[in-house]
Image (tube, rainbow, N blue to C red):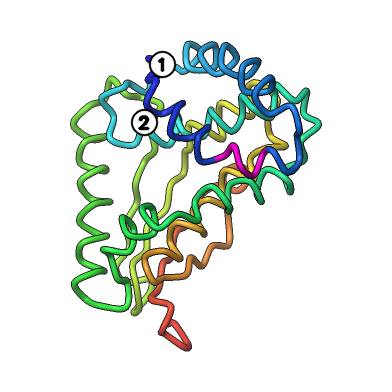
Amino acid sequence: MKYKPIIWIFMTGRMKKGLKEIWPETNALLKKAKPIYKDLLKKVEGVSDKNPMSSNITMSFVIISIWLASERKITPEQMSQVMESALDWKVIRAYFGTIDMNTEKGIRRFGSMMRKDAAWAKQHPEDWNTWDFHFNRKLHRDGFYYHFTHCPIADFCQKHSYQEINPVLCNIDYITMSMMHSRLIREHTVAEGAGNCDYWTVGDKVAEPK
């Protein structure tokens, strides 16, 4: 995958404040992390830059590269705190907040986005390592459900022995879904060794989702 400066600049810019609280020499850490980040991107197989979900990889790899640059001394718990702080920005909240999963309109819009990504993957078999979408409207009455049986990020971490950082990457789903006035109900992840990553997202005003 190609190195995109805008991704690196945006992510490290948002993360810098949180990193400074746990790593005083943050600038030196980021300088060390940058070539690691570029090298990680070069190792990606089966996912192209044209893939609409490729940003999940390019953004996640910023986190992985910084963690590696610290020689894995930054704990997953600390990195999760850094990411919670990084994502707590009015611009990001406003972006995701345009979808309200408490409304039928919001559910339809979110579902349309996911189905569009699924359609792209189906039309581009050359991206053989991408996420595979499986939808089931009958499984739940409330919200929207889908699952993956393959995650290229989890696969990459497994291949290169980065599994320790996986929980940080998976936790981002909970943060972004909460910005859509929703809560993510998840029982399994591929990163934990399960057969799928399940995404049941329900409006946060639904008391007893069914």
Q: How many marks?
A: 2
Magenta segment, which residues?
Answer: 15-19
Give the residue number, with chain letter if any, for mark 2: 54
Residue 193 to residue 107: above or below:
above
Mark closer to the observer (2, 1): 1
Residue placed farthest to the bottom in the image? 207
Q: Position of residue 74 (x, y in %)?
A: 76, 36
- Between disc 2 and disc 1, whose residue precedes? 1
Q: Which one is nearer the viewer's eye here, 86 or 59?
A: 86
**170 vs 23, nearest the viewer:** 23
The verdict on residue 54 being magenta is no
Task: Name the quarter where the C terminus is drawn.
Answer: bottom left
| Residue 134 x, y percent position in the rendering | 34, 51
Q: What amino acid is at disc 1? A: Tyr
- What's the mark number on residue 164? none
Can you say whether 118 is above or below 112 in the image?
above
Is residue 16 covered in magenta?
yes
